Amino acid sequence: MVKNLSNIVVLETNIFVSALMFGGKPGQVMELASQKVFSVVTSPVLLGELVETLSKKFDFDTLHLRLAEKKIKQLTRVVQPTTEINVVRDTSDNRVLETAVEGKAQYIVTGDSDLLDLKQYKNITILTVTEFLRVLEGK
């Protein structure tokens, strides 16, 4: 049984890509987001990264890129970060943290080891997909 959380979550680009391309646990997380079990926040930068990844790594054409972007936008609230963060070496990871702070997220769900090594940033817990599913299940 999955608890309905009023939590706000940032799903990093790799989670969306895995959900869209392969399903599995990232797909489960995306499905729970569509059921409003939790709220998802993103930013224009993260959406751009998603579109770029789908285009370059998976050869999505313009139509499929627009459909994927539309699907993600329907699941998320887009925020524009106003604070620059420079805590991890990869600048794209810092953009994830900025989105989480601006969106007042409680969780970041990622497969990125640099972010996962942080474990926590301010009041934001950084988890893998599996760990986040356990939180949702109340284990």
Image: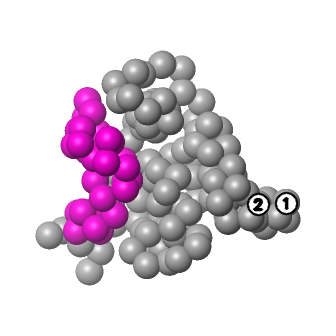
Q: Is residue 59 rendered to the left or right of residue 44?
A: right
Name the residue: 65% across, 60% down: 57
Position of the N terminus by quadrant:
bottom left
User: At which x and y percent is residue 134?
Assistant: 22, 68
Query: Is 93 above or below relative to 113?
Result: above
Residue behind mark 2: 65
Q: Are marks 1 and 2 in contact (CB under 8 Å)?
A: yes
Dot 2 falls on a residue whose secondary structure is: helix
Residue 66 visible (yes or no) = yes
What residue type is disc 2 on?
Leu
User: At which x and y percent is residue 117?
Assistant: 23, 42
Q: Residues within 10 Å of mark 1 (few under 14, many from 20)?
A: few
User: At which x and y percent is residue 62?
Assistant: 85, 60
What residue type is disc 1 on?
Thr
- Location of residue 43 (image quadrant): top right
Residue 126 visible (yes or no) = no
Name the residue: 70% across, 55% down: 56
The stretch in magenta equals 108-135
Residue located farthest toward the left when viewing the structure as drawn: 139
Instruction: Indicate which disc residue 62 carries.
Output: 1
